[in-house]
Image: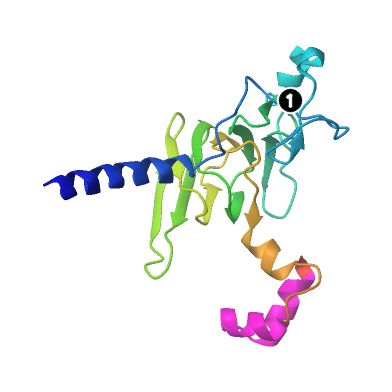
Amino acid sequence: MANLHFLFLGLVALSFSVMSMAADQSPLQDFCVANPNGQGTFVNGLACKDPILVQASDFFFSGLHLTGNTSNPVGSKVTAVNVAQIPGLNTLGISLARVDYAPWGINPPHTHPRASEILTVIEGRLEVGFVTSNPQNKLITTILNKGDIFVFPVGLIHFQRNVGDANAIAIAALSSQNPGVITIANSLFGSTPDISSDILVKAFQLDKNVVTNLQSKF
């Protein structure tokens, strides 16, 4: 019985450990405003500004009321608000983004290597989805209307598409000050230098001319 008790406690401790690794580490002080000149104590890869010099502007951003320019091949625009825009987000483990979609525009398949995402539809109607990991590769998808919310687990490939004839807007909250983004098509067909076309031909089971054409587009 005692062994079972210790096993249970061990599993509980492990579960909390795993949960703690699901987002940025907890801060060790009130804040660590990122210092653009790189001087100070480094936390999360960024130097801390002297707390005496911290101002309200270090925690402020204005611009999410502005409509993003969706005149591009995918028909969407992401306006990110992370530690690059708000230095005061450093070590706090959160960030935000506004996503604008033209009619039938998409936020193409991508991943956030360091964050889960919770998306809220502000205007319009979106088709959203993510794909589970190997070997299932199951597509989890649904349609969202104004006020609806959907969660994308950390690291999984996900997407959104405006399925309406008017512009759509969503706000995404992410569990990292710097979630990162890997857009699948751009990464594979637009890398510098190019991934060998022979590798992509085998991976996607495509004709080499098709792969070469895709690489030229990115």
Vertical arrangement, residue 106 with respect to residue 26, above or below: below
Quadrant of the image occupied by residue 134: bottom left
- The one nearer the camera, 71 or 68, is 68
Quadrant of the image occupied by residue 94: top right
Question: Disc 1 marks which residue?
Answer: 33
Residue furthest toward the left? 1
Residue 194 part of the magenta segment: no
Vertical arrangement, residue 184 with respect to residue 54, above or below: below
Q: Which residues are magenta?
A: 197-216
Image location (x, y in percent) of residue 184? 62, 62
Label 1: few (<14), some or many (≥20) within 10 Å? many
Residue sitting at x 23%, y 45%: 6
Residue sitting at x 50%, y 37%: 119
Whether residue 92 is visible to the viewer of this picture, yes or no, is yes
Q: Where does the C terminus fall, quadrant-wise?
A: bottom right
Q: In the shown orientation, is residue 112 left or right of residue 193?
A: left
Whether residue 60 is visible to the viewer of this picture, yes or no, is no
Image location (x, y in percent) of residue 1? 11, 47
